Amino acid sequence: MTLKKSLNILTLARARYYSIALLFVFWSPVTAADLTISDVKQDLVSSKTSNRYQAAELILYHRAKIPTSDINHAIQTESNPQVRYRLMQSLAAQEGTAAVPTLISGLSDPNVVVRSVAARELGRIDGGIIGRKALISCFEHDSDADVRQSCVVSLGFYHGRPVLDALAHAAVDLDVRLRLGAVVALSLQHNREADVILLRLAHDLDHTVAAKAQAVRSGK
């Protein structure tokens, strides 16, 4: 298992738990071909959580093309966090950079899994300067370590002095998850300053952090 894959499992453990549980509760064997766009839009505003979750899954996995305005409205009015984070993923997959404002708003969601997913999606698409600023701010101020780690990992896909400064702070954080996240992010930064931070992490007191940093530096 690669370093990046192992961090993905760590930071999205709670999201995966929700997904597996909801498959048994909500899912029925239906595809986008079985439903019209009108059906999916109707399910997005259904009073049944199972219908709303299924609609989000259809948009995400079967690419049921729903207008951005409908997805944004569904995210803003959705009370169930599991449906909300699926809608975040659906919007990012469908709209790419057009989803950035909604994903940034997701960083302030009351649910930690939604915030973590919003941070991860901002790493998968190009959030530009505003995405970078939002991730750094969330890393600095969020109270949940998993959310902060998701921000750190996603910052690896961005560049510039503010990113390196944030990663340097994550590399000395007391929480080992932040230091592991820094290793992953720094592995995506191909410059001398990133290597200097990795060198320090290669001597981290935590053996896992040290081993992973050493593996990145040796190109494994």
Image: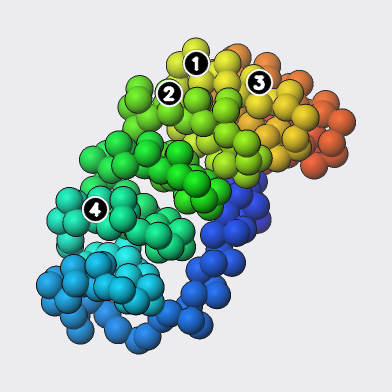
Numbered disc in front, either 1 or 4: 4
Tell me whether the residue at label 1 lies in contact with that at label 2, contact meaning CB atoms closer than 8 angstroms: yes
Determine the residue positioned at 25% across, 67% down.
Answer: 45
Q: Nearer the viewer, residue 186 or 176?
A: 176
Left or right of 103? Residue 99 is left
> x%, y% of residue 62?
28, 70
Among numbered discs 3 and 4, the one appearing first in the sequence: 4
Residue type of the residue flagged with mark 4: His
Q: State the CA–CA distance, disc 1 to disc 2.
A: 8 Å
Left or right of 175? Residue 39 is left
Q: How many marks?
A: 4
Above or below, comparing residue 6 to residue 173 in the picture: below
Q: State the CA–CA distance, disc 3 to disc 2.
A: 15 Å
In the rendered structure, find residue 133 and report the number of the disc placed on it. 2
Q: State the CA–CA distance, disc 1 to disc 4.
A: 33 Å
Numbered disc in front, either 2 or 4: 4
Residue 200 in which image quadrant: top right
Among numbered discs 2 and 4, the one appearing first in the sequence: 4
Residue occupying the far bottom of the picture = 29
In the rendered structure, find residue 169 and report the number of the disc placed on it. 3
Residue type of the residue flagged with mark 1: Pro
Badge 2 density bin: few <14, some 14–19, many ≥20, Cα 10 Å: some
Q: Nearer the viewer, residue 100 or 111?
A: 111
In the rendered structure, find residue 162 and report the number of the disc placed on it. 1
Image quarter where the N terminus lies is bottom right
Q: Residue under label 4, please give it.
A: 73
Image quarter where the C terminus lies is top right
Among numbered discs 1 and 4, the one appearing first in the sequence: 4
